[in-house]
Amino acid sequence: MMNTLEQLEPYYMAARLEAGAYEQDTPLQDLEWMIAELPDGRSGFADALTAEDGVAVIAEHKRKSPSEGQIGPGLGVTWTVEQYQKGGAAAVSILTQRIHFGGSIEDLVEARQAVDLPILRKDFIDREYQLYQAKAFGADAALLIAGGLSDDKLKDLHEEAEAIGLDCLVEVHNEAELCRALEIGTRLLGINNRDLSTMRVDTDTARGLIGMVPKDVTVVAESGYSVREPRHMGMLRELAVDAVLIGTSLVREENPAQALSAWQSAVILE
């Protein structure tokens, strides 16, 4: 059975190829200039997840995934993220990996132009260029997957992101990865319930790890939470997570704003 790093390598390879192509047209120095010109004052991604009553929602835009296949192949970015903002999402997540998820860096740019919510760039990041690219093109945070990075690489990327004012959501799948994330001082932790070696989802993963997380670390539940009715949000609140990242079930909603509003209002009113 392949380990997590081996399982993720095809996705990292695709992301490296895409980043390399962008770097030919927009070198790192250009991204540094773009970042230097960015206005100050936009709220941080991590702060937004702790400013909500109940469980904050990171609403995700994606068109397909390896586990689900085609989800919303023609899904427009502007309409989707505007729906998320209207429905009360605390933040949005934009999948920018093209080959396996149907996204692009242009989706990130479009989302930034459409809404003022904090934005997470979700991709397979293993080089500094991708962090600078995320910041320059509108992201407030970037995903780092502990299982796909060595100890040194995880630490270095986390430090570089902080240096350019980019929050990091550090994703873990098990106790060993959780310990590695806490060792680098992350304050924003994503617990992914999907076992990448089997692609099976076990929502007890978060339940088993949550007790090991210090109180000052913001916890995001990822994968496997198909929220379709108010009681599901109540179950997440009982789990004591700060936020949940919801992708597939929201993408498939005809009226994402209405669904989001109903889910969150039910929890707040309990």
Image (cartoon, helix red, strand yellow):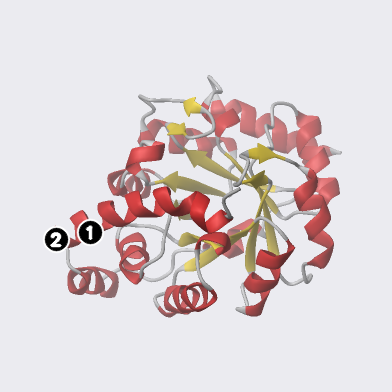
How would you rate the neighbour count of disc 1 (Cα within 10 Å): few for under 14, some for 14-19, many for 20 or more?
some
Residue at 67% across / 32% down in the picture? Answer: 226
The extreme left residue here reads 25
Residue 175 location (% of width, % of height): 74, 63
Task: Specify whether 164 is left or right of 217.
Answer: left
Residue 194 location (% of width, % of height): 65, 44
Task: Specify whether 142 is left or right of 218.
Answer: left
Q: Which residue, given by chain and number where applicable, does mark 1 sit on?
A: 20
Query: Mark on residue 174?
Result: none
Task: Specify whether 139 is left or right of 49.
Answer: left
Q: Which residue, given by chain and number where applicable, does mark 2 sit on?
A: 24
Which amino acid does the dot numbered 2 rest on? Gln
The extreme top residue here reads 254
Q: Secondary structure at mark 1?
A: helix
Are the residues at dot 2 and dot 1 in contact (C-beta closer than 8 Å)? yes
Q: Looking at the picture, does residue 19 appear above or below residue 255?
A: below
How would you rate the neighbour count of disc 2 (Cα within 10 Å): few for under 14, some for 14-19, many for 20 or more?
few
Q: Secondary structure at mark 2?
A: helix
Residue 114 location (% of width, % of height): 36, 43
Residue at 69% across / 26% down in the picture? Answer: 228
